[in-house]
């Protein structure tokens, strides 16, 4: 009997040790060496997707000793944990660890936003080949062609909430009247508090009829293979690397940008080719909601960055300069993880302070809730310019405009959901470039803030979601 008792005692001890190990690994008990694990009480606000500190056991507890895993914004946290500190924009599973003891303290689950109804799209509208990504302007038709990459950086990286735009632009002869420098490089950095670096430079092109002679902007096929002096972009979907530097763009600062883009699925915004979209001589496709990582060097200081970006490639006939009088373009990133792309082309001079456009075939609104995997297209679009900046003479550039968008009558599958989008877009920090006599053309490129709401109905309930975010804008006007 005594041996049986010993065996039972050993079994009990083993079970206690196993249970203790499991509880330790789950974070319910601390290390046996007596690590001082703080007691932090959080308030979880599901409506605002926020964790707020209600109390902390010691006013000298460092946030650096706390590891926070999950999709959230930690940018407002300072050195010590204080009552009232907030972890915001929480999505999905958020885990909070104590670093010194490697202990899991808390696990919080935030329900994702309700699923927005998506558009049913044809397969060829989401198919971009390496040939499509390459150069199209090397023809006697003298095509205009643009490649550009933009990004809104995360609020917890080294450049929180900043935006960057890198553009390689082959303009058509005559876009800049009597200007023989139609190759353009754009490199801009803008911060939410008004800092600005970079700008735009246009260089001479010596080629004749688009095919004979040299060009400052060199482009090859297949894939993206661009070079503008010391700046370049290279890659094939879904990955590209962009390197940008040019001392002439910003004479007061040295800027070097190295960014890697990773995208999901493309979408052909427009093409005059019915089946193979890449065969159109007027075409544009986008990759939106791209994951972006890299580094930026400003005056010798290196910043590690990450964020969500957008890539667009478009081309058109040189003759388009005769009927396109301007455009508005914007990629918006919202706190709930959504991205919205907006573009509009104007066929008349935008001289008046306010212009509205109802059911305009040259306006586009595309929403993605999952970084480009699924899309919701709204075709009934009403745009109102609320504020403008006068560049010179009659040339006005929008600095604030509102958008109302909903499904059109032709969108039979989406119409029943009664989707309504309202956005207010305000240019906060931008680089403005003007070409005066005889060109009379202006551009506004930079950072904007966005506020709005989206409503829709489905079989479960009526949904009403507030939208708050930051965007990159690029507007053009010409007389």
Image (cartoon, rainbow, N blue to C red):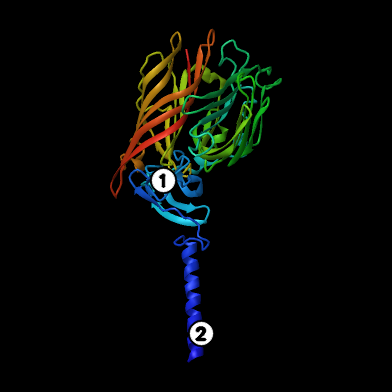
Residue that label 1 marks: 90
Tell me which residue sits at (51%, 14%) in the image.
Answer: 441
> Residue 317: where, in percent of width, then height?
56, 23
Taking depth in this image into account, of 59 and 187 the one nearest to the observer is 59
Q: Residues within 10 Å of mark 2 (few under 14, many from 20)?
A: few
Residue 470, x across and y down, in percent? 44, 32
Residues 333 and 212: in front is 333
Q: Position of residue 12 (x, y in %)?
A: 47, 78
In the rendered image, the residue lying farthest to the right is 213
**Residue 114 vs residue 473: left or right?**
left
**Residue where numbered disc 2 is placed:** 7
State whether residue 100 is above or below residue 307: below
Is residue 382 found left or right of 254 in the rendered image?
left
Q: Specify the quadrant of the image occupied by residue 393.
A: top left
User: Of circles 1 and 2, which is in front?
Assistant: 2
Q: Is residue 237 visible?
A: no
Front-most of 134 and 451? 451
Q: Is residue 188 above or below residue 366?
A: above
Q: Nearer the viewer, residue 245 or 75?
A: 75
Q: CA distance from mark 1 to mark 2?
A: 50 Å
User: With 440 as the anchor, is 402 left or right in this view?
Assistant: left
Element under disc 1: strand
Q: Classify mark 2: helix, strand or loop.
A: helix
**Which of the 4 image quarters holds residue 384?**
top left
Query: Which sits earlier in the primary sequence, circle 1 or circle 2?
Result: 2
For the view shown, which residue lies furthest in the bottom direction? Answer: 1
């Amino acid at each position: 009997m005594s041996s049986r008792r010993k065996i039972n005692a050993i079994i009990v001890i083993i079970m206690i040790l196993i249970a203790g190990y499991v509880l330790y690994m789950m974070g319910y008990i601390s290390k046996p060496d007596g690590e001082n694990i703080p007691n932090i009480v959080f308030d979880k606000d599901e409506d605002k997707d926020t964790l707020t500190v209600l109390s902390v056991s010691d006013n000298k507890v460092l946030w650096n000793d706390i590891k926070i895993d999950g999709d959230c914004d930690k940018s407002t946290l300072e050195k010590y944990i204080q009552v009232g500190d907030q972890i915001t924009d929480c999505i999905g599973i958020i885990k909070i660890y104590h670093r010194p003891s490697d202990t899991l303290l808390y696990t919080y689950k935030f329900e994702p936003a309700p699923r927005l109804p998506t558009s049913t799209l044809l397969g060829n509208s989401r198919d971009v080949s390496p040939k499509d990504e390459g150069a199209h302007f090397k023809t006697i038709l003298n095509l205009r062609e643009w490649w550009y990459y933009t990004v809104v950086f995360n609020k917890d990286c080294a450049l929180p909430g900043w935006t960057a735009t890198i553009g390689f632009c082959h303009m058509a002869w005559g876009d800049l009247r009597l200007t023989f420098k139609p190759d353009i490089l754009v490199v801009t950095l803008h911060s939410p508090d008004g800092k600005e670096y970079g700008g735009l430079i246009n260089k001479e092109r010596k080629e004749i009829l688009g095919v004979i002679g040299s060009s400052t902007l060199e482009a090859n096929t297949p894939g993206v293979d661009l070079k503008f002096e010391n700046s370049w972009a290279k890659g094939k979907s879904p990955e590209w690397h962009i390197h940008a530097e040019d001392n002439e763009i910003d004479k007061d600062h040295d800027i070097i940008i190295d960014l890697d883009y990773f995208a999901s699925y493309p979408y052909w915004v427009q093409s005059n080719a019915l089946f193979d979209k890449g065969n159109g001589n007027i075409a544009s496709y986008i990759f939106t909601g791209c994951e972006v990582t890299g580094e930026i060097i400003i005056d010798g200081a290196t910043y590690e960055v990450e964020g969500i970006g957008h890539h667009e490639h478009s081309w058109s006939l040189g003759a388009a300069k005769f009927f396109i009088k301007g455009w508005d373009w914007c990629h918006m990133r919202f706190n709930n993880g959504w991205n919205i792309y907006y573009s509009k082309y104007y066929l008349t001079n935008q001289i008046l302070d306010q212009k509205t456009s109802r059911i305009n075939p040259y306006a586009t609104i595309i929403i993605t809730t999952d970084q480009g995997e699924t899309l919701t297209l709204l075709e009934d679009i009403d745009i109102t310019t609320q504020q403008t900046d006068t560049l010179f003479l009659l040339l006005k550039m929008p600095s604030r405009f509102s958008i109302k968008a909903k499904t059109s009558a032709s969108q039979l599958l989406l119409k029943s959901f009664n989707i309504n989008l309202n956005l207010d877009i305000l240019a906060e920090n931008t680089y403005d470039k003007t070409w005066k006599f005889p060109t009379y053309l202006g551009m506004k490129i930079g950072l904007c803030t966005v506020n709005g709401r989206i409503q829709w109905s489905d079989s479960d309930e009526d949904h009403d979601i507030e939208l708050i975010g930051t965007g990159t804008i690029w507007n053009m006007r010409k007389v």
